Image (tube, helix red, strand yellow):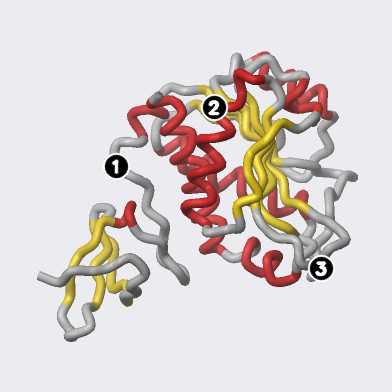
Amino acid sequence: MHRANKGDSFEIISLNDDWYEVRLPNGGTGFVAGWIVKVEGSAPAVTKPGAEQHLENKTIVLDPGHGGRDNGTTGARGTREKDITIRTAQLLADKLRSAGANVILTRSGDTYLPLPSRVGISHYHNADAFISIHYDSTPDRTARGATTYYYHPFQQELAANIHSNVIAMTNLRDRGYRAGDYHVIRENKRNAVLIELGYLSNPAEEALISSAQYQQSATAGIYQGLARYFKN
């Protein structure tokens, strides 16, 4: 028996049924539940067993920000927001569909879509949740962290659940969740949030955001936040 403490790190050998086989300091091996640890490197992030039961048959609209002639912001290293929002949305869609959710993307390629059309998709499909995915930018290149926005009071609980789980999974600086006057949530009659998943204007955070590990962690956080919201 080996007792691990918070902050301990172990080399991952393999992943079996959501449990990581890890190498212990004494050279032996052990198993740890994948949903209670944070992984670094290329190992896949594991979501908590049972979450899928709260997502099954839910209609979730994912809105990758920008697209087409609208690049969004461009990072210090040249990352275009429109490219990384679609990458995040597609990865999240795969996770949610695996749980049995009905997932609709407002755009599935590099196309321009006006804001009212994005809201219209949410209303047309009677979305149980609408998630608009963005990345942040500011002239201050040291700014970092994630922020989640809602507009109507009934959207606040969804924002709180998604935000707390994204922060827990990514360890980004917590900039909080708050009311924000954005068209896609203001005009949306469904439970809708807009999340800014880090700053492309910060070169270090841009490099992190672009990594496969971060994309896995961020989408796992949104997945868990949605499951927690529907469970409640």
In the displayed structure image, the side of residue 171 where residue 36 appears, left or right: left
Please give the name of the residue rendered at 79% of the width and 57% of the height, measured from the top-left corner.
80
Amino acid type of the residue tagged 3 in the rendering: Ala
Q: Is residue 137 above or below residue 160?
A: below
Q: SS of the residue at dot 3?
A: loop
Which sits in the foreground, 54 or 181? 181
Q: Do the residues under discs 3 and 1 have CB atoms within 8 angstroms? A: no
In the displayed structure image, the side of residue 124 where residue 225 appears, left or right: left
Q: Determine if residue 141 is in view.
A: yes
Q: SS of the residue at dot 1?
A: loop
Position of the N terminus, as image quadrant, is bottom left
Q: SS of the residue at dot 2?
A: helix
> Which is closer to the viewer, label 2 or label 3?
2
Please give the name of the residue rendered at 47% of the width and 37% of the height, measured from the top-left corner.
96
- Residue 113, image x, y percentages: 82, 32
> Which is closer to the viewer, label 2 or label 1?
2
Dot 2 corresponds to which residue?
A: 157
Please give the name of the residue rendered at 75% of the width and 41% of the height, measured from the top-left corner.
65
Which sits in the foreground, 178 or 213? 178
Residue 76 bears which disc, if any? 3
Which sits in the foreground, 104 or 198? 198
Please give the name of the residue rendered at 72% of the width and 45% of the height, measured from the top-left corner.
134
Amino acid type of the residue tagged 1 in the rendering: Pro
**Residue 112 occupies quadrant:** top right
Amino acid type of the residue tagged 2 in the rendering: Glu
**Residue 163 occupies quadrant:** top right
Dot 1 corresponds to which residue?
A: 49
In the displayed structure image, the side of residue 36 where residue 166 appears, left or right: right
Q: CA distance from mark 2 to mark 1?
A: 22 Å
Q: CA distance from mark 3 to mark 1?
A: 38 Å
Q: Is residue 123 above or below residue 14?
A: above
Position of the C terminus, as image quadrant, is top left
